[in-house]
Amino acid sequence: MNSELFIRSSSQEVDFALFKDGRLIELHKEEENNKFSVGDIYLAKIRKTVPGLNAAFVNVGYEKDAFLHYHDLGPKIASLLKFVKRVSTGKLKDYSLKDFPLEKEIDKHGGINDAIKSNQSILVQIVKEPISTKGPRISSELSIAGRYIVLVPFSDRISISQKIESKEEKERLKRLITSIRPKGFGVIIRTVADGKKVAELDRDLQSLMDRWNAMCKKLQGAHHPSKVLSELDRGASILRDVFNDSFTNICIDDETLYLQIKDYVQSIAPDKENIVKHHDSNVPIFEKYGVDRQIKTSFGRTVSSTKGTYLVVEHTEAMHVIDVNSGNRSNKSKNQEDTALEVNIIAATEVARQLRLRDMGGIIVVDFIDMAQAKNRKALYDHMRDEMKDDRAKHKILPPSKFGLIQITRQRVRPEMNIKTREDAPGTVSGEIEAPITVVSKIAEDVKRILTKDYKKVTLNAHPFIAAFLTKGFPSARHKWFMEHKKWVKIQPRDAYTYLEYHFQDKDGNEII
């Protein structure tokens, strides 16, 4: 597996495109004016408590108050409130928590008015960015994420990622963290800590303690509300969460950002420093590396996959619905059940990619093609879980129902990535058409399907613009088809066709469907 990251910078925003084996799997956008990123910590003031919701509304500086539920207070909320008050008034200068007396934990079944009051100062962390008409979702159970560990103030627990499967490795990591963990802080050991030495873990821990101390220094005299700790910029946070030995290329078109990313990679993986490159060319970085092409073909209501299969993605108020279609594909399977399984496996891979790419959250229902055999439904379920195991968002997948439906819940902490793929129709006052680049991709898929069959002669009839695009230059798209399939496709321009209309014919002039 090869992973690549392409970063495009402009004056207002930075786009991050993450590739896996040549396929776009994640697309992130960081705007300059985004003040409420997941992980940011604010010194805020409780506006009011609402016992009916068992929650409070908190002023963090957003146009709408943030929502803080009782279950997001954390058991140590009383200790946190006491700490904030003493530090803010200058009575506490030692931020290490080693001598800080902890208060009694709150009842997990208690009420909001038993724990907090209106106008209290409180430290809160953004866990869900503002989406649509809703303000941020926040928590007062703070955590500061590093490369290998996550630091949790006012806790004494050591937790280990469930993705680390070796029992011996878990015990080793727990021993190492126990020996270096500062009193008053809990630690969550991340998956990438697997196999790391104590020196690397300790360096990460000290870096997190430095960030904690720097945050505490800001509390004294700070106004309400104010940001006291910023999450790493999106580029560094993406690398922190996904960077591993599979990365072969990180390319950035902004020199300042290039130097920052290079320094960060040098600090976490010195042997990988040389994969960070500065894109200095007149050709835009997303065009040079085919990112724009994949964006155009991956978003939109209909998404094509391999072997002619395609998905139809619908968004409703309550959920996302994805329909799986087999399309006009060549069938080499012996029976309908094998065909259904093959199509479903291909579709499951694309569904997992689409969820990450669009950052879809909430309830997702996927309507796969019905399969009669229980072993095939299990094979589909296992494949779906395997494809989503690298998804960083919390998710749960239910086995297929007898109707062929798989239900997925996926955590959404940021607004969904929604990119317009349709364009204004040329020569019309109003109306839209599919982006031409998506049609070219569909033609290529159809060519692959048709040329694998026993056709002696194939003619493609298309609008002159599309015909010119496919035949001009060297190697043209048609030359590439010939090199791959060893068959020549005649391309006939048709003035009467609409821009995106095309048809295939055999040697007798009959249309190939």
Image (spheres, grey):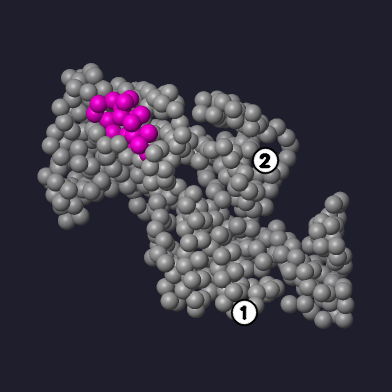
Task: Say the numbered circle drawn on residue 391.
Answer: none
The residue at the far front in this view is 168
What residue type is disc 2 on?
A: Ile
Residue 306 image point, x, y percent: 65, 63
Q: Is residue 97 left or right of residue 28?
A: left
Is residue 69 visible to the viewer in this orientation of the structure? yes
What residue type is disc 1 on?
A: Asn
Is residue 358 visible to the viewer in this orientation of the structure? no
Residue at 17%, 56% in the rendered image:
52
Secondary element at image label 2 = helix
Q: Is residue 480 left or right of residue 29?
A: right
Counting the numbered discs, the total is 2
Q: Which residue is mark 1?
A: 335
Marks 2/1: CA–CA distance: 46 Å
Q: Is residue 83 left or right of residue 31?
A: left
Chain part drawn in magenta: 170-188
Residue at 88%, 77% in the rendered image:
507
Q: Crowding at label 1, few (<14), some or many (≥20) Cα neighbours within 10 Å?
A: few
Task: Say the numbered circle drawn on residue 285.
Answer: 2
Residue at 40%, 49% in the rendered image:
413
Q: Quadrant of the C terminus?
A: bottom right
